[in-house]
Amino acid sequence: MSSYRKWRESGHLEHAIEAASGVEAFEDEVHHLREEARGWRLAGNGCDLDSWDVGPEHA
């Protein structure tokens, strides 16, 4: 049995959804965490988002 299957059958996902007060709240938090991780990946790649010249005034 793969470790993924063991995790799925462990009940951890159901417990996490219950702890988040439902599927919608759980999915919202997962989305938030993914966006936060994306920002950290960008920062780790040397991107300084605060200093980027973006927008029509800098085009």
Image (cartoon, rainbow, N blue to C red):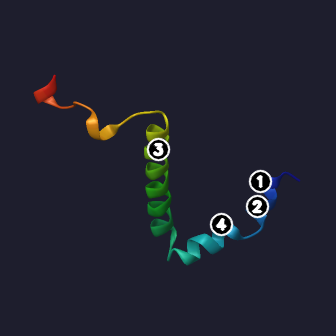
Spot occupied by residue 8 in the image (x, y as percentages of width and height): 74, 61
Image quarter of residue 55: top left
- In this rendering, the answer to whether 31 lies above or below 16 is above
The residue where tag 1 is placed is: 4
Along the viewing direction, whichever of 23 and 33 lies nearer the viewer: 33
Residue at image location 13% in from the left, 28% down from the top: 56
Q: Earlier in the sequence, mark 4 or mark 3?
A: 4
* Local SS, label 1: helix
Give the amino acid type for the residue marked by disc 3 in the picture.
Arg
Give the amino acid type for the residue marked by disc 2 in the picture.
Trp
Assess whether mark 3 and mark 2 are in contact (beta carbons under 8 angstroms). no
Whole-number angstrom distance, CA of label 3 to CA of label 1: 23 Å
* Local SS, label 2: helix
Left or right of 44, for residue 59:
left
Q: Earlier in the sequence, mark 4 or mark 2?
A: 2
Along the viewing direction, whichever of 38 and 49 lies nearer the viewer: 49
Numbered marks: total: 4
Whole-number angstrom distance, CA of label 4 to CA of label 3: 22 Å
Give the amino acid type for the residue marked by disc 1 in the picture.
Tyr
The residue where tag 2 is placed is: 7
Residue at image location 47% in from the left, 63% down from the top: 29
Whole-number angstrom distance, CA of label 1 to CA of label 4: 12 Å
The residue where tag 3 is placed is: 38
Assess whether mark 1 and mark 2 are in contact (beta carbons under 8 angstroms). yes
- In this rendering, the answer to whether 5 lies above or below 45 is below
Give the amino acid type for the residue marked by disc 4 in the picture.
Leu
Residue at image location 49% in from the left, 49% down from the top: 37
Residue at image location 51% in from the left, 74% down from the top: 20
Spot occupied by residue 17 in the image (x, y as percentages of width and height): 57, 71
